[in-house]
Image (tube, grey):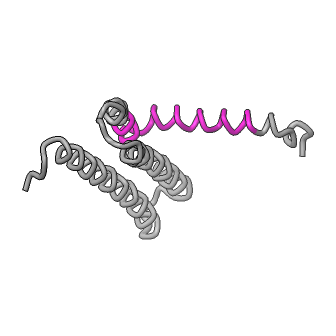
């Protein structure tokens, strides 16, 4: 092992560099990631101005980041699957489908959190709507 590889500062710098490269690559190559980032750019300021408790605001922000995290993992799973085989294989299809389903579940979670928080805010302002 190289001497500089043991240096914690060098390891940290390398880790940050690899992470930034992963974000750049995902932005360039993954349309779904770009769409989710754009949605986050729109929703993030909205989450900042909705007059709700900090805990509800954090739920909104974490749910948005969860979608991005799972999308990155989905992209990684797809890339690894394609590296192993480009031929159709039932297990490769299963891996890709499960990774895609994880993104779908994260998106549903995010949408539900937004609906619940917005409903809570609306009913606090306007009274019970039912």
| Residue 61 within the segment the image draws in magenta | no
Q: How many badges with numbers are in the image? A: 0
Q: Main secondary structure of the magenta part?
A: helix
Question: Residue 32 lies in what quarter of the image?
Answer: top left
Identify which residue is drawn at 88% across, 36% down.
4
Q: Toward the viewer: 13 or 60?
A: 60
Identify which residue is drawn at 41% across, 64% down.
98
Horizontally, is 130 left or right of 75 in the view?
Answer: left
The relative height of residue 130 versus residue 12 in the rendered view (above or below) is: below
- How far across and down, in percent of the image, does residue 92 sit? 46, 64
- How far across and down, in percent of the image, does residue 42 sit? 31, 31
Q: Residue furthest left?
A: 130
Q: Quadrant of the C terminus?
A: bottom left
Identify which residue is drawn at 52% across, 31% down.
24
Q: Toward the viewer: 46 or 111?
A: 46
- How far across and down, in percent of the image, does residue 51 sit? 30, 36
Magenta residues? 12-37
Horizontally, is 71 left or right of 16 in the view?
Answer: left
Q: Residue furthest bottom?
A: 90
- How far across and down, in percent of the image, does residue 69 sit? 48, 48
């Amino acid at each position: 092992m190289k001497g500089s590889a043991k240096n914690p500062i060098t390891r940290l710098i390398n880790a940050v560099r690899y992470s930034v490269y992963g974000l750049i690559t995902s932005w360039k190559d993954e349309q779904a990631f770009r769409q989710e980032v754009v949605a986050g750019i729109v929703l993030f300021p909205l989450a900042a101005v909705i007059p709700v408790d900090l805990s509800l605001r954090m739920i909104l922000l974490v749910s948005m980041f969860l979608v991005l995290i799972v999308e990155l993992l989905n992209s990684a799973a797809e890339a690894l699957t394609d590296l192993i085989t480009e031929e159709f294989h039932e297990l490769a299809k299963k891996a890709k489908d499960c990774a895609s389903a994880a993104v779908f579940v994260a998106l549903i979670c995010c949408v539900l959190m937004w609906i619940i928080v917005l409903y809570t805010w609306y009913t606090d302002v306007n009274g019970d709507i039912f």
